[in-house]
């Protein structure tokens, strides 16, 4: 039972310290699941996030359910799901009740203004994590060392550039871009 309670606590901790959605949660997920508790490795984490993006629902919720199930079966999945949801629901309901009264509060405005750069930093950390495991052959920290092995996976970089260009200029539906990327990855890599 302690294990199930720990899963709830772990995901509640991630949920309470994340403001800005699923992509802002990714660095916290990565730290807690890969680095701190070693539930999964970096490649499995990347695959889990990709799978969580493809399934209906928020990325963080899907990832919490998946890891919860992997670590504790159905009860673990319920604990992970509840853990990630309870903080957001509590904050969201509280905000809905009290926001009308505090809409013009300068302290609230300053707090929300201060949270924006932190969330941008967390999303940037997620981008760097995925670039390190998909485009680069070694962590970016190796770029600055003399003996660090560092390189670029040209096919992966090409797929990224094509998807970025197509999405920027043609506004192609993301589903088609994901499907095309999967096919290109299977054929090229």
Image: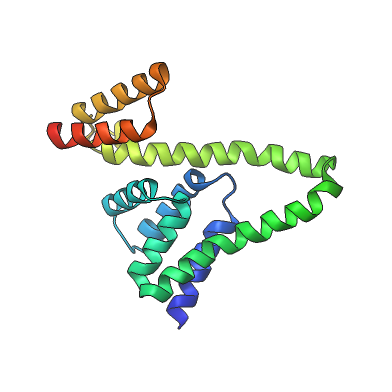
Q: Give the residue drawn at x 58%, y 54%.
A: 17
* Quadrant in the rendering for residue 186: top left
Q: Quadrant of the C terminus?
A: top left
* Quadrant in the rendering for residue 165: top left
* Image vertical order of residue 122 relative to residue 14, above or below: above
* Image vertical order of residue 162 relative to residue 1, above or below: above
* Image vertical order of residue 97 relative to residue 113, above or below: below
> Would you say 189 lies left or right of 21 here?
left
Q: Give the residue drawn at x 55%, y 57%.
A: 15
Residue 135 visible to an observer of this rendering: no
Q: Position of residue 156 (x, y in %)?
A: 23, 31
Q: Position of residue 67 (x, y in %)?
A: 37, 63
> Would you say 166 lies left or right of 20 here?
left
Task: Report the front residue among 111 and 184.
Answer: 184
- Outermost residue toward the top? 169
Q: Quadrant of the N terminus?
A: bottom left
Q: Position of residue 182 (x, y in %)?
A: 23, 37
Q: Give the residue drawn at x 45%, y 40%.
A: 125
Q: Give the residue drawn at x 83%, y 47%.
A: 100
State how many labels appear. 0
- Outermost residue toward the bottom? 1
The figure's colour scheme reads rainbow
> Would you say 41 lies left or right of 35 here?
left
* Image vertical order of residue 8 relative to residue 32, above or below: below
Residue 157 visible to an observer of this rendering: yes
Q: Position of residue 83 (x, y in %)?
A: 53, 66
Task: Report the front residue among 99 and 33.
Answer: 99
């Amino acid at each position: 039972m302690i294990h199930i309670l720990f899963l709830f606590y772990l995901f509640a901790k991630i949920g309470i310290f994340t403001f800005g959605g699923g992509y802002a949660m990714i660095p916290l997920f990565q730290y807690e699941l890969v680095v701190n508790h070693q539930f999964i490795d970096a490649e499995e984490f990347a695959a889990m996030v990709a799978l969580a993006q493809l399934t209906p629902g928020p990325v963080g919720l899907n990832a919490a359910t998946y890891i919860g199930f992997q670590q504790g079966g159905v009860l673990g999945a319920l604990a992970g799901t509840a853990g990630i949801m309870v903080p957001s629901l509590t904050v969201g309901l509280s905000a809905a009740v009290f926001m009308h009264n505090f809409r013009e509060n300068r302290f609230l405005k300053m707090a929300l203004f201060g949270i924006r750069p932190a969330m941008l930093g967390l999303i940037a950390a997620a981008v760097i994590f995925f670039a390190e495991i998909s485009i680069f052959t070694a962590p970016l920290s190796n770029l600055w060392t003399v003996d660090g092995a560092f390189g670029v996976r040209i096919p992966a970089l090409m797929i990224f550039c094509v998807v970025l260009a197509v999405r920027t200029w043609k506004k192609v539906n993301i589903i088609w871009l994901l499907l095309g990327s999967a096919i290109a990855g299977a054929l090229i890599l």
